């Protein structure tokens, strides 16, 4: 049968096959999408009152008048690089009548530039995708302006070449074992101080990852794909033409309901019962604490890492190696804080045609000016608020435990207003004086991430983010387990993209859906999984590195230094043996 232009598989004859998806975040939604398209009866149990997890919009109550919607806040701004494949494939299957193309994918718009805000000096912009000699000159000039040199740029690009020509065993071993800052040489004086700070700040655009904490396997993967995108066919950086819920999640929910998916809000998973080798039932609780048993042919656990960790009983850990690894991890060591803030403006203050890093900001801020993108579609600024809204500056705060100029950390805040004032001060301090004054005077309201709980004892965070510390790949679970009717669909699951992101969660959801279908005797091949071509190139060099790695030798690019060090060591030993006299005839 047909549904929204997508061909749905007829339900299998006999008793309907059922799957309980426990969690309505990105992984759970992707899994439900794939399963329902294949004719399976799906019920989503979501603890909150909305779908999308950390991606859902957070509307500011009572700010919309005369039929307008409330001001839209977000957990953080949205970033859809060209290498995202699973997420974009899903978007192309979701109908949206307000999209220019009729699907959610049409709500994506290119962000042509990237910017670095240097305190007191203003914003340096470079093109995301140089298309001409003029663009290339601008990119080189921008690198020089932020303190870089051609030699330092070549060194940084060389590190990516080393990653791309490394064999899988080296990537999974020694590269996974070290943080990105060490892998690129930022901790060994390989770059000048100014350019080093820029390079370390670049990882903030990849889910606010700290280069000192994120493993080189993960950050190198994402960074290499971003660099490859600069020479590909698609736009390197894209954002939405409106709030995430309006442009994506609300259309998705409508489509899933049309496909027969039942969504039950306010039902939080609290337990899984194991009967022999299978899950017999799940338990969910409502807001009153009333517990309900959920029975299904298969169960998909699609909750955040810390929630999943609490649900794994000793019996579950004994039944599956992936769950045993997950039970043994420490969520506090694998996650970090990232928070969002929005400043609503009565006149637009465009900062950069793309994402902007505020260099030197104590709380590691990145931001984007939304009006220039939203006003290109049907969901422009005029749709929200009381008629005064002309612009929104959306901010990611990536370092919540670092003191600002007054010695205050975000986690020390005692009110939302105080925290927002400190974020605004750091934004203004990172701009040239005139732009900073214009921004401050245009603010008519602000929103702080609702996942943050602020009170007299400080701040807590209900939505921490996986930051891929070195060694975490070894403890992360697979989507398909040895328990035949339990599957995992969340951003901490092992995936090909290996990045805690919407793309990673979507891929995990697809892997879980394929596994669930096959466990019920159905064909799972209709669930598409994508590869990332740049990571599979240079096969000859990767084969050579496999041979070197197997012989406990360094990468080909490190061999000259290895040989020099070996010769120096041998010479030193020879001189010590001969008392400092060189041997001769």
Image (cartoon, rainbow, N blue to C red):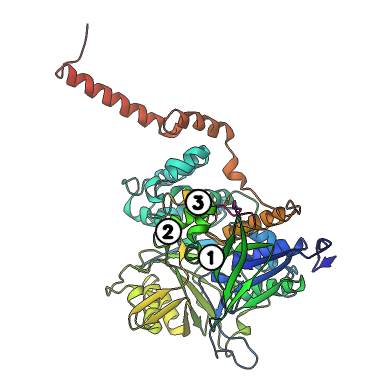
* Element type at mark 1: loop
Q: Across the whole image, how many numbered discs are drawn on residues? A: 3
Q: Verify whether residue 424 appears in magenta.
A: no
Q: Say which mark, if any, is on residue 354.
A: 1
Q: Is residue 134 above or below residue 267?
A: above
Residue furthest to the bottom? 66
Q: Say which label, 3 or 2, has the lower sequence index.
A: 3
Do we see residue 154 in this rendering?
no
- Mainly helix, strand or loop, the magenta region? loop
The magenta stretch is 477-484
Q: Say which mark, if any, is on residue 334.
A: 2
Q: In which quarter of the image is the C terminus?
A: top left
Closest to the camera, between mark 3 and mark 2, is: 2
* Element type at mark 3: helix
Q: Residue 518 location, x and y as percent?
A: 71, 53
Question: Is residue 236 left or right of 208 when viewed as pictured?
Answer: right
261 or 88, nearer to the observer: 261
Can you identify the residue that label 3 sits on? 223
211 or 384, nearer to the observer: 211
Q: Identify the residue at image location x=42%, y=43%.
A: 155
Q: In which quarter of the image is residue 484?
A: bottom right
């Amino acid at each position: 049968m047909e549904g929204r232009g997508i061909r749905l598989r007829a339900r299998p004859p006999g008793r309907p096959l059922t799957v309980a998806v426990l969690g309505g975040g990105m992984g759970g939604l992707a899994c439900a999408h794939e399963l329902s398209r294949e004719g399976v009866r799906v019920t989503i149990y979501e603890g909150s009152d909305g779908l999308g997890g950390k991606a859902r919009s957070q509307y500011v109550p009572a700010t919309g008048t005369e039929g307008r919607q409330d001001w839209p806040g977000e957990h953080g701004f949205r970033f859809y690089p060209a290498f995202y494949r699973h997420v974009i494939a899903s978007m192309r299957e979701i109908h949206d009548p307000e999209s220019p193309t009729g699907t959610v994918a049409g709500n994506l718009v290119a962000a042509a530039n990237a910017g670095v805000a240097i305190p007191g000096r203003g914003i340096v912009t470079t093109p995301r995708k140089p298309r001409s000699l003029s663009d290339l000159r601008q990119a080189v000039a921008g690198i020089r302006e932020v303190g870089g040199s051609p030699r330092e740029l070549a060194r940084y690009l060389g590190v990516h070449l080393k990653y791309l020509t490394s064999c899988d065993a080296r990537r999974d071993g020694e590269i996974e074992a070290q943080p990105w800052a060490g892998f690129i040489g930022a901790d060994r004086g390989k770059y000048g101080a100014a350019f080093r700070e820029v390079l370390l700040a670049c990882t903030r655009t990849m889910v606010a990852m700290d280069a000192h904490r994120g493993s080189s396997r993960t950050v190198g993967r994402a960074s290499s794909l971003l660099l490859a995108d600069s020479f590909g066919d698609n736009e390197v950086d894209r954002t939405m033409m409106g709030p995430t819920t309006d442009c994506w999640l609300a259309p998705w929910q409508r489509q899933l309901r049309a496909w027969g998916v039942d969504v039950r809000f306010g039902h939080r998973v609290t337990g899984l019962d194991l009967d022999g080798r299978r899950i017999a039932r799940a338990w969910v609780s409502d807001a009153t604490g009333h517990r309900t048993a959920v029975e299904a042919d298969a169960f998909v656990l699609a909750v955040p890492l810390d929630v999943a960790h609490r649900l794994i009983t000793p019996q579950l850990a004994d039944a599956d190696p992936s769950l045993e690894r997950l039970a043994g991890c420490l969520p506090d060591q694998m996650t970090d804080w990232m928070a969002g803030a929005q400043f609503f403006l009565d006149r637009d203050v465009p900062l950069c045609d793309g994402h902007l890093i505020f260099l030197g900001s104590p709380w590691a801020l990145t931001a984007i000016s939304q009006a220039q993108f939203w006003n290109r579609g049907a969901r422009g600024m005029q749709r929200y608020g009381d008629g005064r809204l002309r612009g929104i500056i959306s901010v990611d705060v990536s370092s919540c435990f670092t003191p600002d100029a007054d010695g205050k950390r975000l986690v020390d805040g005692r009110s939302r207003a105080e925290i927002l004032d400190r974020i605004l001060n750091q934004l203004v301090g990172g701009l040239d004086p005139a732009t900073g004054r214009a921004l401050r005077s245009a603010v008519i309201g602000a929103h702080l991430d609702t996942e943050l709980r602020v009170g007299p004892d400080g701040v807590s965070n209900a939505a921490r983010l996986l930051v891929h510390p070195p060694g975490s790949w070894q403890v992360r679970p697979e989507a398909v387990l040895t328990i035949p009717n339990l599957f995992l669909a969340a951003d901490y699951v092992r995936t090909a993209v290996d990045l805690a992101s919407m793309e990673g969660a979507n891929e995990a959801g697809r892997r879980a859906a394929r596994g669930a279908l096959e466990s019920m005797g159905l064909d799972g091949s209709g669930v598409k999984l994508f590869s990332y071509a740049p990571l599979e190139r240079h096969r000859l060099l990767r084969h050579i590195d496999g041979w070197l790695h197997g012989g406990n030798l360094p990468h080909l690019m490190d061999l000259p230094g290895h040989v020099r060090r070996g010769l120096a060591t041998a010479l030193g030993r020879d001189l010590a043996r001969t008392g400092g006299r060189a041997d001769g005839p």
